[in-house]
Image (cartoon, rainbow, N blue to C red):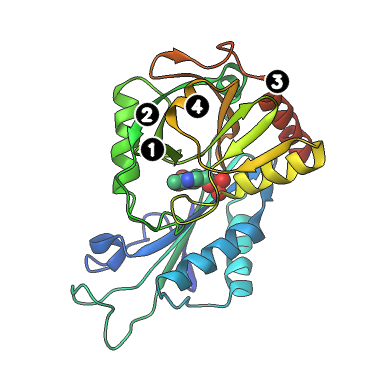
Amino acid sequence: AYVLMNDDFVSREAARVDIEDRGYQFGDGIYEVVRVHGGKLFKMDEHLSRFVRSTSEIGITLPFSVETIKDKLLQLFELDPLEDGMIYFQVTRGTAPRIHHFPEPSVPARLIAYTKTSARPAQLQQQGVQCVFAEDIRWLRCDIKSLNLLGNVMAKQQAKTAGAYEAILHRGEMVTEGSSTNVFIVNNETLYTHPANNFILNGITRMTILEMCAKLNIKVVESTFTTQDLLEADEVFISSTNIDAMPVIQVDGRPIGSGKPGALTKAIQREFEQLFN
Ligand code: PDD
């Protein structure tokens, strides 16, 4: 297994970062997860543009051009090819004596990447999953794919403790997204999802689903909805790089719709199958 560390490809054992790396001390960095399906990278360019946007929003200067980063990720993928799994990559503001403001003089940002094999959760995708509601206690720039994931970690743990698959976050009454997913509800054959603003991460999978809906002539409304709307919806599903569209059949112990994956959710899942083939 290889790890990309800026210019070098090193073994997993040799990959080491300093205790004063700002990612380690402050969560001061950005990451991406790119899906590999059947040996092919999925939506790499979209992930790279979101990566560039996130880094520029927090003032990290990337060590290479986006083209070079892409080349390096493809080289890593050649060294460590896989059928199903992901490429994880992240950049931190670099290593400098610990002080909150940006290092002066500036230090080079540290880019790392590695691949990991993981299977798609096919059975759950067919059966659907249970979720719980959790208060969204994160900061107000959830559009940035930051390494600071404490709010997400705490919410996911809440789900895990409750024996649920995901925590559906809400600010007051308003549903935002999942701890590591976007959230969709279906009512009268119309799809609703939170607008892409500072309260959610605009998922690459979310954008893919919106494109699919345009193609399938499914009406989409990007607007906020409440926890009550969600409980009363015909269908609910969540999306991310790891799960495509995952049916949600129960929230806080209450069945959604028929308590089985819905027709529109399944239509979107079929679109993903086509995309991957
Ligand atoms: N999570 N919202 C949040 C908070 C996320 O962390 C993610 C992805 C998404 C979905 O984004 P995308 O469709 O681009 O994967 C939405 C990744 C997979 C993770 O943290 O592992």
Q: Which residue is depicted at the point 55% across and 21% down?
A: 124
Q: Amino acid at mark 4?
A: Leu
Q: Position of residue 228 (x, y in %)?
A: 45, 25
Q: Amino acid at mark 3?
A: Ala
Distance from Cα at disc 1 to Cα at disc 3 = 26 Å
Label 2 environment density (alpha carbons within 10 Å; few <14, some 14–19, many ≥20): some
Tell me which label, 2 or 3, sits earlier in the chain.
2
Distance from Cα at disc 1 to Cα at disc 4 = 11 Å
Q: Which residue is depicted at the point 39% across and 58% down?
A: 141
Distance from Cα at disc 2 to Cα at disc 3 = 24 Å
Q: Are marks 2 and 3 in contact (CB under 8 Å)?
A: no
Distance from Cα at disc 4 to Cα at disc 3 = 17 Å
Q: Position of residue 31 (x, y in %)?
A: 45, 58
Pointer 4 residue Cβ closer than 8 Å to ligand 1: no
For mark 1, what is the residue?
A: 170
What secondary structure is found at the residue carrying circle 2? strand
Q: Amino acid at mark 1?
A: His
* Outermost residue, top side: 258
The residue lying toward the viewer, choosing from 41 and 188, is 188
What secondary structure is found at the residue carrying circle 3? helix
**Placement of the C terminus among the 4 image quadrants:** top right
Q: Which residue is depicted at the point 28% across and 78% down?
A: 102
What secondary structure is found at the residue carrying circle 4? helix
Relative side of 49 to 146, left or right: right
For mark 2, what is the residue?
A: 133
Image quadrant assignment for residue 210: top right
For mark 4, what is the residue?
A: 230
Tag count? 4
Q: Are marks 2 and 1 in contact (CB under 8 Å)?
A: yes
